[in-house]
Amino acid sequence: MRWLLATYSPLIVRSLVYMLQATEYNIGSYLSWFHRTRDFSKVIQRKSLVYTQKAMLLVLIGVAVYLTTILIAVLIALKGGFAIIIGAALIVLLPVIIAYVIIIPLIIGQYAIQRPKEKRMLEVAQAQLRKQHCRKIAIAGSYGKTTFKETLATILSETLHVAASPGNMNTPIGLANFIQKLDGSEDVLIFEFGEERVGDVKRLCELTHPNMGVITGISEAHLSSFKSIEAITSTILELRDYLKSYDVYKNGENEFITAAIPASDHHLYSEEGVNGWKVSKVATSIEGTSFVATKHNKAIWAHTSLIGRHQVGPLVACIDIADKLGLSVTDIAEGIKKTKPFEHRMQPYKLLGATIIDDTYNGNLKGMAAGIDVLKSAKANRKIYVTPGLVEQGNLKEVNHVKIGHMIADSDIDEVVLMNNSVTQYITRGMKENGYKGHTRIVDEPLEFYTNLSQYVASGDVVLLQNDWSDNYA
Amino acid sequence: MKTVAVFFGGRSAEHDVSIITALSSVIKPLELTGKYKVAPVYITKDGRWYMHDKLKDIKQYQGSGIEKLLASIKPVIVDFDGGFSLLQPTRFGQKRVKVDIAFPAMHGTFGEDGSLMGILDMANVPYVGCDLQSSVVAMDKILSKAVAKEAGLPTVQDVTFSASEYRENSSSMLDRIEQELSFPAFVKPPHLGSSVGVMKVVDRASLAEAIDTALHYDNKVLVEKAVANLREATLPIMGYGDTVIPALLEEPLFNTDEFFDFDTKYLRGGKGGKKGGGKVGAKQGAQGYSNVPANFPEKLYAEVQSIAVAGFKAAGCCGIARVDILIDETANRIYFNEINPLPGSLYAHNWAKAGYSNVALVEKLIEFALARFDERQRLITTFDTSFLKQF
């Protein structure tokens, strides 16, 4: 009954516009969600529809289409005979009609208004940057970009005037907005590059003209749109190709990068070191990470509240960049001390005496492995692992989730909480294959679980929350 | 999915406390297990039983909502159908809810005292917590002290009497109390929990007044000598059979001239009240400010825990209970005080510190309930005889 009401009442319009907003008006993602969804009563869960002018307009159009379609269906049906069937068919197809008709003005708007406006914005940003002669560092990769960007900005800010693109604003328009806000006095600009299609990184290079680069890692993120890992690799390596003779730091702990880059490249960073820096005395716990980095007569005792051994490689790359930009070892050590976990990325907090590690922005297999590794080494009353799995894994969906199941089974985890969805079966299969002996809880309502987390935890527990599916994936 | 019926409210002075226990510490965690369907069974102060999903919402009880809701639905009918079913009258007939497991979340009379357990035993349905026999012992402060004494546990010196004994010759009873116990003393109605009707007395006049008050609540009275240099401790325990799991020893905090009565426990937010703020560093638990774990020397902690566990076992408790202990700090004497067969809110705050989440706690309690039920099913309670043939 609730399902029927949500599908055929005017409320469907709100759900459709909400999803357009949630997918950032990406028509492909929106239509893919629409055809996958069977129950429209549970669409708006994590957020709510923000009534912007655009959203208001779409709601009005949707309601108009709703009423017009019903009116037409009734008028046709009144003719009797076969017309009744046509009228009934129109009513049955009502949600489909609205779903498609509301995107027509959106498409027209995109071509007639938005794209020309965005083109002008990009030209202005490009011209502005050309005038600014400073260090411009671009960060690309399937994962770890935001943490690297924030870490580097924190360290360099010890002595330099640094501006970094905020949050996840890593599209051309996002970066153009950021550029327009610069005052031109910055010593260092740090840009995070997002990628969803082949050529995206090259386009961002042409917008920002970087003179230093970092490639944080390559994984199967966005595999659904790229179709192959080769396409992802070549797209991310567009940064290396663009920068040619400039320094490009690459994650030497990533197999896709090491397969594409010769081992002799002294900008390959890892927990061993980079570019002459040697790392030793690595210690990590849920309180933080520490290590010593030495190069010639320089030594840095690094302490950070960032969690996990996988943080050491990026940190030593940051040390080398900071060294190159003239920071003293004391400044670098002070800067590292100020780095801290970023929101929803291996971010620990306390709840009823339990330690919760919020890694809900983690959306790739490598990151999942790093998080599980931290949980494995943690000292805890109970180790609890919570995940819905990964999205956009394309044809590796099954393989990667079975791998996650294997990792869970091999990590002494006491309780696993899985959100019931299309990948749950693969994770549980992996757990079974590797003989998982702990307790498994499968949750139908993820939001209910997260909002009642305090009911599930007790003092001494360590709980790792990895990834969270937004409404368009749920 | 199995249905767990949670019983709360009831004909008890602790009616409202029971609502909080059920809604905060039982129903929500049970639902979050994802294993059980929860049927909330609310028993009104006049003893009518209602079952409705809206009864899971605390807002219903905070205004006139509950009266309106109850006026719109009919009380349930209990059906002993070889098990235990609740029939909810609807517009089109009756909706039958077969109860697979019962979870009493009731405090005080007609619930925690064994009454409900008797009904559940008759229906042969598994239920959580202390059984009929241990509930009866635990809820009678006189009986539980007798059981503890029999088990060799130290108890505070007392005088006990019935209403009729007192009325026959109140003056001589007061004399006896004055002779055997010195002031200050505590007067307690032996069957009530949450310190309802308990009064501290300092002279003959206040003693007589307190006994009169206690006799409004009960037909027996327990008068105990007050423990000097008092420190209190309480220990939530769960278990069944050989498995006994103590939580953390908890020390309620108070000023020496204060007494931990119902008002202090539930209405003012603990000893010293919310305004008082309690001792620095202490946490506010279900019953106010307390130290969890109690800040006792290691040896004292171990001794107190040992006496509490022995009290739990002596009374035959199973499922969950909380044992209260009194300590004369100067004389270094420890006394078994009483047992609470269903601690308020299950003492979930303490269990969480001891490593049991709310969800894990209710799961464990259901596990114990099912184990006890299985064991009881194996007992022979009936057999064929030729007895009737002789008539």
Image (spheres, coloured by chain):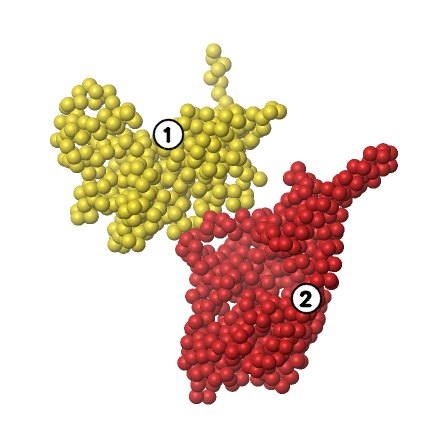
Chain colours: A red, B yellow
- How far is disc 2 from disc 1 in space, using C-alphas? 71 Å
Foreground of the two, A173 or B326:
A173
**Quadrant that contains the N terminus of chain B:** top right
Q: Which mark is residue B12?
A: 1
Name which quarter of the figure residue B218 lies in.
top left
User: What amino acid type should be assigned to the residue bearing mark 2?
Assistant: Lys
On the image, the x and y values in percent for residue B273 come to 29, 44
At 18% from the left edge and 30% from the top edge, which residue is drawn? B207
Judging from the image, what secondary structure is the residue with disc 1 in? loop
Q: Chain of mark 2?
A: A
On the image, the x and y values in percent for residue A56 come to 64, 51
At 48% from the left edge and 77% from the top edge, which residue is drawn? A161
Mark 1 neighbour density, 10 Å: few (under 14) some (14–19) many (20 or more): many
Q: Chain of mark 1?
A: B
What residue is disc 2 on? Answer: A117
On the image, the x and y values in percent for residue A443 come to 57, 49
Mark 2 neighbour density, 10 Å: few (under 14) some (14–19) many (20 or more): few
Foreground of the two, A412 or B47:
B47
Foreground of the two, A441 or A234:
A234
Q: Which mark is residue A96?
A: none
Compared to residue A100, the image places residue A286 above or below, namely below
Say if labels 2 and 1 share a chain.
no
Q: Is residue B144 visible?
A: no
On the image, the x and y values in percent for residue B230 come to 21, 44
Foreground of the two, A248 or B25:
A248
